[in-house]
Image: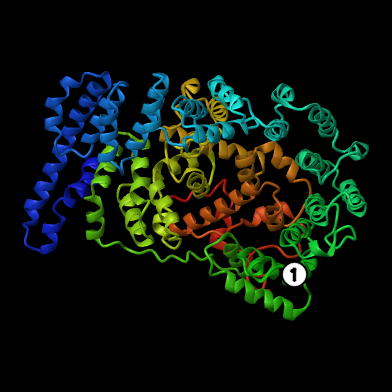
Amino acid sequence: MIRMLYQGLLIALALFSSASLTGKANPHRESADALGIEMQRFRQRAVFLEARQIARSGKRSALQPLLESLSDYPLKSYIEYEALLARPYSTDDAVQGFIENHPDFPISAQLRRAFAHYRRDQNRPESFLRFHQPTDADIDNQCFRASALWTLERIPEAMAATQALWLQGRSQPKGCDKAFSRWRRAGGLTQALAWQRYELAVLADEDRLAAYLERTLSEDQRALARQLTRLKQRPTRIDRYETIDFKASEQRVLADSALRAFVKKRPAEALVFITDLEDSGRLEAAQALEYRYAAALRLIREDNLALNDVLIPAALRTDPALIEANLIQLIKAGQFNALLTPLSQLPPSAQDSLRWRYWQARAELSSSDPAARESARIRFERLAGERDYYGHLAAQWLGISGSLADQSTTIAPERLLDLAAAPAAQRIYELSALGETLEARREWFQLIKPFSNRELRIAAGLASQWHWHDMAIATLAQAQAWDEVLERFPRPYAERFTEAARTQGVPVTLAIAVARRESGFWRDARSPVGAEGLMQLMPRTAQSVAKSIDLDTPTNLVLTDIDTNIQLGTAYLGQLLQRFNDNRILALAAYNAGPSRVQKWHTHPQPIDAFIEGIPFAETRAYVKAVLLYAAIYAQLSGRPEPLLYPYEIEQFSPNDSLPIGPGVFNETAPAVESAQDAALNPRVKHNAF
């Protein structure tokens, strides 16, 4: 309650900001008034909750006395919204009036969608069209829209809407049948459109729909469909391409799909076949080049073909994506001395990226030429000033701390007060106080949509004041304010993370870095695949971990509970560290992609930076780099700087690496690590608090 009152004071003070800035107001009186307003707000919240319950019940007559007591409450409009929502037969004018009077409220869009659903269920086509937006992705609404247009004899619109519904590769709801029937009778279904939908169904692997659609095809089209179906079933059977005409419009799409499947399954054979097709004139040169590109990229990534192989035409040997794929294979193989030539072939913009600047230095460092090694040192020094994974790697080669590159700024209090006083900001604050996080987030994104970068920076400052860290982080990212390190790397729930980390034997910097990457500290975060909470745990994983640590009620887990999520997420991280011999790189990759995949990836000794660069999944590769960097940043912010990579981790990856990452590479007399830090670099014993 004390924290709520303290935070609420900012809102209350905003109401008096103009007076306070003039210097004429009594500060003691202002503080009392501000506290009084916050107490009034506290009472109004109780009234609001009561009024909302009544509004949802549809008893509009009982609302009036409560609405009068909420005359100046920021969320009063939400009561009117709930009252309309609870009465599906509210007049169109009443609903439209609310929407027009509240154009910037997210609930207006929600009300519009709700009444489109109501009017569909009520079979009121004209009213439905007043509320339905053509961009609405609800397929049932799209079908009803097409039918409504036919009912109202808006023929051109009806024809276009129905054709759009037809050209889908999946079965449509029964609600579309009426529109399809009218469309066919009006001559909308041509043989070309019948074939297009058949193609879409085949490409979507909708076999039942494709079989059904064959009845809409002509006799010749059905014969062709059978031929192309056989080709799709066995795309690597060269004899099944003999009668395929890659230039014919009706054959091109499905033949292309089959040939791409051939390239994916057997790229080396496909390269030869593509050459034969081009030589015989069956494939245009531009088409053949696309297939060769796909085959070459796959072969290079499988480490089966060097970029200068004779099968790759000269036009592709300078393609940046193929060069980068080749570079990754050389890096994975530890052939650093072979990187310089392909690096020089990259476009200047790519060469200037932090990634390839690092590997340029790494390649030069592998040389025995003193001039090349000196060039590597200079490159590392320039990179080390970047607050980036590669910048911190470069710093580690130099034996110095990675750069925070912090340029955090302070927002003038009056700017925060002005924004806090805005009606939308007050609605957001009240929604948050009531636990309506989703509605608060919708209001926030609506509020900042038109903001400039400067205004976004102020908004992020307000979010930080409210301890709304995920919104502050997201808003700073939208403003591209990357150097606001203190706000971009907050340390909420520090005591809880510290306690969980100590219990599970996990570096606290690593646990909090995982939460920062996974959710930005959004307690209610839920991913499309079902991961939940701060540390984005899958329910099944959480159940397993809960049982393993003897949690009292593992079957009733609430993963959006902060304590539960931190406890289980940190425990899972600790289990992965145990499984992978305290190696954070492998544990992080497993946290993101699963332990079994990581065991397949880590099959032979290789330099640690090469392994990270060669992680097959782009998402996992980026994840590992980011969390390592975040952990290093949090260590610096806590006053206990750590290297990006621990010495024992480097040793685990490549015991015989002649060029380990660590202090002393350019100074033969420097110690490997400072003696005061040496014992602390094992995560099993390091538990620095914030």
Assign a secondary structure to mark 1.
Answer: helix
Q: Residue at x 35, y 46 (%)?
A: 446
- Residue in front for this viewpoint, 633 or 638: 633
Quadrant of the rendered image containing residue 152: top left
- Vertical position of residue 532 compared to residue 365: above or below: above
Question: Callout 1 environment at 10 Å: few (<14), some (14 to 19), or many (20+)?
Answer: some
- Residue in front for this viewpoint, 322 or 538: 322
Q: Amino acid at mark 1?
A: Gln
**Residue 638 at least partly seen:** no
Q: Which residue occupies the extreme bottom position in the image?
A: 371
Residue 223 located left or right of residue 440: right
**Image location of residue 530, percent across then percent down:** 53, 32
Residue 337 located left or right of residue 408: right
- Residue in front for this viewpoint, 178 or 398: 178
Residue 132 located left or right of residue 289: left
- Residue in front for this viewpoint, 611 or 180: 180
**Image location of residue 679, percent across then percent down:** 57, 55
**Image location of residue 184, percent across then percent down:** 61, 26
Q: Residue at x 41, y 25 (%)?
A: 125
Quadrant of the rendered image containing residue 658: bottom right
Coloration mode: rainbow
Quadrant of the rendered image containing residue 600: top right
Q: Which residue is mark 1?
A: 345
What count of labels does the image hold? Answer: 1
**Image location of residue 577, percent across then percent down:** 61, 42
Q: Residue at x 21, y 35 (%)?
A: 76
- Vertical position of residue 665 compared to residue 600: above or below: below
